[in-house]
Amino acid sequence: MKKLTMTFLNEAGNKTYLKPTVASEDLAADKVKEVMDSITDLDLFEKSGEKMYVETKSAKYTETTVTELF
């Protein structure tokens, strides 16, 4: 199973992450970047008075291998 992690920079320049619980496992990089840029343009999210998603940094899929024991 692959999970998408989108990394942004917040207002202070620190990394902040957005991990959608439902995401296709084969999204194109340009489409993900487009969506991330849209999120930064919306300027909707704040935490402790600080804007959370100010700049698009990176995106990656993390694949987890599960081995059943019994």
Image (tube, helix red, strand yellow):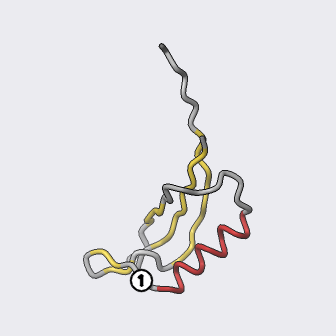
Task: Say few, some or many: other residues with alpha carbon within 10 Å of mark 1 (under 14 / 14 to 19 / 20 or more).
Answer: few
Q: Residue at x 65, y 67 (%)?
A: 32
Q: Where is residue 63 in the image (x, y as percent from the top left)?
A: 60, 41
How many numbered marks does the figure carry?
A: 1
Quarter of the image containing the N terminus? top right
Please name the amino acid that badge 1 sits on: Leu
Q: Does dot 1 land on a helix, a strand or a loop?
A: loop
Residue farthest along the left direction in this orientation: 48
Q: Residue 45 or 7: which is nearer the viewer?
A: 45
Q: Residue at x 70, y 69 (%)?
A: 31
Taking 61 as reference, is 42 above or below it?
A: below
Residue at which label 1 appears: 44
Residue farthest along the top direction in this orientation: 70
Indicate the quadrant where residue 30 lies: bottom right
Q: Where is residue 48 in the image (x, y as percent from the top left)?
A: 25, 76
Q: Where is residue 57 in the image (x, y as percent from the top left)?
A: 57, 68
Q: Which residue is drawn at 60% across and 45% down?
A: 2
Taking 38 as reference, is 18 above or below it?
A: above
Q: Residue 26 or 52: which is nearer the viewer?
A: 26
Indicate the quadrant where residue 13 lies: bottom left
Q: Which residue is drawn at 61% across and 74% down?
A: 35
Taking 42 as reference, is 70 above or below it?
A: above
Q: Position of residue 20 (x, y in %)?
A: 50, 59
Taking 61 as reference, is 15 above or below it?
A: below
Q: Residue 2 or 13: which is nearer the viewer?
A: 2
